[in-house]
Amino acid sequence: MPAAKSLSRNYFYHGTRVLKNKYQTKNAEQLEKRMARDVANAILALQKEELPERFDASYIKHIHRCLFGKTFEWAGCTRDMLFKFQDGTSALMSKMGLNPDFSFVDGEKIQEQLLSFGEIIAGKNNLKGLSREEFVREVTQFFASLNWIHPFSEGNGRVQRLFFEKLAENAGHELDFSLVTNKRMTSVCAEAMENSNLEPMEHMFEDISDPKRRSLLKNFMHHATIFKEGILDTRCIVVAKEGVSISGSVLDITRDNFVINSNDTLIICATKDLERGTLKTLKKGDFVSLTPSQTPGVLIPERRMGPLSQSELSSMISQNSSVQECLQNIKRLSKIIYGNPEAVNGTMNLVLRSPHYAQQISERIQNDPKSIAKLAGRKFLCWKSRTRKAAERHVVLLSVAVETHGKIVTRARNESMEEHQQKQMRAGHAVALPSRYLSEFFSLSPQQRENALSQDPGLKEDFEDYVRSLNQRLSPNDRKAIREEDCMALSRTLDVSVVQAQKIVELVKITDGIKQELEHSASKYLTMKNSASKYLTMKNSAYARDPEQVYGNLSYTSAQSQEQVYGNLSYTSAQSQEQVYGNLSYTSAQSQEQVYGNLSYTSAQNQNPAHDSVYGSIQSVKDLQQQDPEHNYAEIDFTKSTNRPVQRSDSSKTPYSTVKKSRSNNRTQSPCI
C-alpha cells in the first residue's frame, strides 16, 4: 500500500489544496459557495427528520452523508477507510492534527473510539432526564471526545454541531450553535485538546443552552454595528460568567446590557451587575472592571416533564366531561338496539385511541348493525316485536352518536395535549430568588416603596418582571394552595420541601400586596385625572350656554360686548361698556366704565380725560399707572371717560354677590344709580 501521506493527498486535486468534488471545480471559493448552499438545504431537511433511536457511529455517518452527499464522493465514509474515486485514485487520511505538535485520533483507532462513544451515550440514556446544568456538563465531555476522534477528512465541525443539536432535542434541551463564532469554536476546541481545559467549552454550552444567555447573544449579534464590517467570526463573543472578574473598555450599551472589549474577546454583561445609578453615567470607551454577581438561588426549581404516554393520554380523554356524556348516550342507545349497554364498548375503546375510526364504525352500524351484535327483540317472517322495531328505529341515532363521539374525542385529545404542553412549559420555568435590590425593596414600608419607585423607574420594571416570572410558574392550583396557606399541597405540586413552600407563600403574598399598592396608586391618579377633565368639561359647557357670565378663577377675553364680571378674574375687553367687580385685573380700550372694589384699572384713548374725577382716596389711574402700572390698590382707582359725573352713595357698599346684570341702551347700570 502506498504511504499514508501520499494517499491523503489523493483527497485533493493534483497540485492544489482543493478537495475533489462533484462540482468538478478547482476554485476553492466556488467550491465553498456551492457546498455552503447544499449543506444549508441538507441541514433543513435533517432538522425535520425524526429523532434516531441511537446516537452512535451510524447516525454520525448518516449526518455526514446527508450534508455532503452532493459535494463529495466519499460522503459518509470515515477517513480511516480506503476510498476509491471515480478517477481511479484511492485516498486515506490516517493522520490529522491541529498543528505539528497535536494530532487527532490515529486512523486505526477511529472505529474503536466511535463504537465506545455510542455505547457510553446509550448507557446514559442519551442524556435524558437531566437538568440543564447536568446536561451541559455531560455534553461538554462528549463534544470534546467526538472532536478528538475527528472521523472525517472534511466537515467534522458541521456534523458535530448537528449531531449534538439533535441529541439535545431528544433530551429535552436546546442548543443554538449559530451563536458561536468560528473564532470561539476554534479556541475552545484547541484549549480542550491541547491543554485538557474544558472550562471554555463548558462556558460555550452554558451560553447556547440557557434561554436568557441565548437572548443576550442574539440581540447583540443582530444589532452590533461592528459586524457590518464582516468580522463576525474573528472575535470570541461570550456572555459574562458569574463570579469571574472582567475588565476592559465599553464597546456598546443598551438598557439591559453592555459589552466589554477585553483582549479581543467581546463580553456581554447585564446592567444589573452595575451599581445603581452607574448606568446613567456609563458611556462608550469607558474602562470598567467588575465581577458579575452570582446567579441568585432558586426559589422554585424547574421540573422536567416527559411527553404524554398513550395510556396517560387515553386516561385524560376518558375523564373529559363531554366524552363521558357522549358515551352515556351511546350506552343508552346500545341498550335499546342490542339489549346490552356494553355492546359497543370494544369499538369505543378503539375510537379512544384512534378517533379517525369513528367514521368507519358509524357507517358500519348504519349499513349493517348486526355486524356489531345481535339486535334486540324478535322477528318472524314479516312480523317484528315492539322491541325489534324500537331497535331498528334507533340505529341511525346510534350511528350519528358514534360519529359525534369521534369528533368529541379528537377535540378532547387536542385539548389534553395542549394542557400537557402548558404544564411542561410551566414546570420547565425556574424562578430565582429575588435580587438584592428587590429584597431590599420588599422590606420597605409602603411610603418608602413609593419613594423608591419615584427615584428609580427601573425598579418598577424589575418588580413587574419578577411578578411575571412567578405568574408564569404558578398554576391555578398552586395559587389556591398559597391563598389557603396549604404548604403541604404546594410542596407536592412544586416538588419542593415544606419549608421552601412556606417561603414561596410568604414571598407571593408580599408581591401581591405590592401589586395592589401600585394598582391603587394608578387608580387614584386616574380618578383625579378624570375629575379634572370633568371639571373642565363643565366649565366649558357653562361658558357655551352663557358666554357673557363668568364664574370662578378665570381668564376671560371678550370683544364687542356688555358685561358684568365677578370673582377672581383677569379680563380683557375691547369696544365695550362694562361694570366690573371683585379682585380684578382689567384692561379696556375705547370704553366707558365704572369700576369698584380691589381693582387695578387701565384706560386708553378716553373720550374725555379732562372729566376724570377723584372722590375720597380715589386717585387718577393715569397718575397711578405712571408710578406703578402693575400694582393693585386696596382703595378704588377710578377713571371716568364720560362727561357725566359719578355720584357716590352708601348703596355702593352693597355686597357684590347681590349685584345683577342689567342692560339699557348698551350701558351697564351700577347698583348705586
Image (cartoon, grey):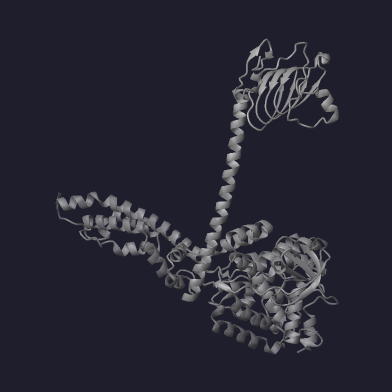
Q: Nearer the viewer, residue 600 or 560?
A: 600
Residue in the picture at 60% in, 25% down: 657
Q: Nearer the viewer, residue 568 or 166?
A: 568
Q: For the N terminus, give its image quadrant.
A: bottom right
Q: Quadrant of residue 38?
A: bottom right
Indicate left or right for 387 with 161 as reference.
left
Q: Quadrant of residue 481?
A: bottom left
Q: Is residue 64 visible?
A: no
Give how far across and how far down residue 159 sits, in percent: 67, 74
Give how far across and how far down residue 29 sits, in percent: 81, 67
Give how far across and how far down residue 363 sits, in percent: 33, 54
Q: Nearer the viewer, residue 325 or 664?
A: 664
Q: How many marks?
A: 0
Indicate left or right for 81 with 339 as reference.
right
Give how far across and how far down residue 167 sits, in percent: 59, 75
Q: For the C terminus, give its image quadrant.
A: top right
Asked if residue 188 is positioned above or below residue 22 in the image, the reply reads below
Q: Nearer the viewer, residue 215 or 611?
A: 611
Q: Quadrant of residue 350?
A: bottom left
Asked if residue 549 is positioned above or below residue 217 in the image, the reply reads above
Q: Is residue 284 visible?
A: yes
Asked if residue 643 is positioned above or below residue 164 in the image, the reply reads above
